[in-house]
Amino acid sequence: MKVGFFNHTGDVSGAEISLLLTAKHLKMAQPVILAPAGELLERARRLGLETAEVPGCAPRLTRNPLRLLAGLTGMLKAGMQFAKTAQLLQVDIIHANSLRAGIMASMFGWLHRCPVIWHVRDMPPSGAIGSVIRRLAALTARAVVGISESVLKGLDSGKLKDRLFLVHNGVEIREISELEKRMWKKRIREELGAPMSAKVLVIVGQITPWKRQEDAIGAARILLEKGHDVFLWIVGEAKFRKENWAYWAKLQHLAKQGVLNGRVKFTGFRNDVTEICCAADLLFLCSDQEPFGRVLIEAMSVSVPVVATDAGGVPEIVEHGVSGLLYPVGDVRALAENAEKLLTNDLFRKQAGMAA
């Protein structure tokens, strides 16, 4: 069977990393990655996967009728090209890697005539838009896969009930010895300017307001003011939207204030997240309604304890007080207090890491 993995963007974030991991390990089906030109197709080719370039299209709702018409026209052209490409490749089933991809694949099902599976990796919208999406899925999707129970709740309806499936994201387990961890710790701390004696906090993810990197900066400030020798690494980059670049500029400004100056390092996008985690003492996840939190399992797989928000899919991964600590979204003081519990208790930190 030939499976067409359709992604609406050529950029790479957690959803695309999970897509490649799935396609790479298929044993009883032949994957082909259908996506716009970009890093996703480049990575897929390096893995030896079959690829096909299709047009990108991400129309937005707008009150401007000309822009709305242009967006709909672009979506029509992109959808037609995608469907024709799937036909030419003789794809047997389309596995859409996002809500947008699922909508596009379903809308042009009359042309490609393949069963469509939606793999939902974001919190579905509520209100009228959410209702329309659920109806479209009920009418067109052969199955809907959600990466957490929290995601599936946003899609639950009577007509879809028997076609909803929970599949948590996975990560490739790397056996890393303590000697190798110490090597990465020394090498990366030298690169990023953090001494071996300090405690390092790391937050990994796209620079965007809902990831709430500002909370990590606020917690680092509290810890520094209490006399803790801490550094914060912010791993990720701003992309996709102007508001993300504006948020990045805001974070840069915050990181230069008072005791924080020189203690916060923006690393940009990194391919070595596992090694970065090995060099840190704690991982923060501060997101508002994180659908899953792939970076959580990446850190936990190398015994790095986490402090994360008690929202979205996170409580399905982190057991509070056992494999990490949870706190209410936006409560910076609680984030700092939980970090302090782990930073000042080496035994607890090690036990939490092992449990993770």
Image: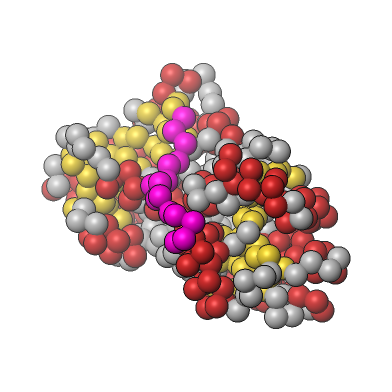
Q: Is residue 262 visible?
A: yes
The stretch of residues the image draws in magenta is 166-180
Q: Quadrant of residue 144?
A: top left
> What type of secondary structure mainly makes up the magenta span?
loop
Q: Quick one: which residue is furthest to the front in this view?
A: 179
Point 39% across, 37% down: residue:
118
Image location (x, y in percent) of residue 123: 56, 42
Q: Quadrant of residue 234?
A: bottom right
Quadrant where the N terminus sits is top left
Image location (x, y in percent) of residue 296: 55, 48
Relative height, residue 118 to residue 36 (above, below): above
Q: How is the image coloured?
A: secondary structure
Relative height, residue 89 to residue 202 (above, below): above
**How many numbered circles does the render carry?**
0
Q: Quadrant of residue 51?
A: bottom left
190 or 112: which is nearer to us? 190
Q: Is residue 211 visible?
A: no
Image location (x, y in percent) of residue 149: 55, 31
Judge left or right: residue 77 versus residue 160.
left
Point 59% across, 62% down: residue:
280
Image location (x, y in percent) of residue 324: 65, 43
Q: Is residue 167 magenta?
A: yes
Judge left or right: residue 205 versus residue 169.
right
Judge left or right: residue 354 versus residue 56.
right
Q: Is residue 9 magenta?
A: no
85 or 50: which is nearer to us? 50
Quadrant where the C terminus sits is top right
182 or 159: which is nearer to us? 182
Judge left or right: residue 13 versus residue 1.
right
Point 49% across, 47% down: residue:
301
Point 75% across, 70% down: residue:
229
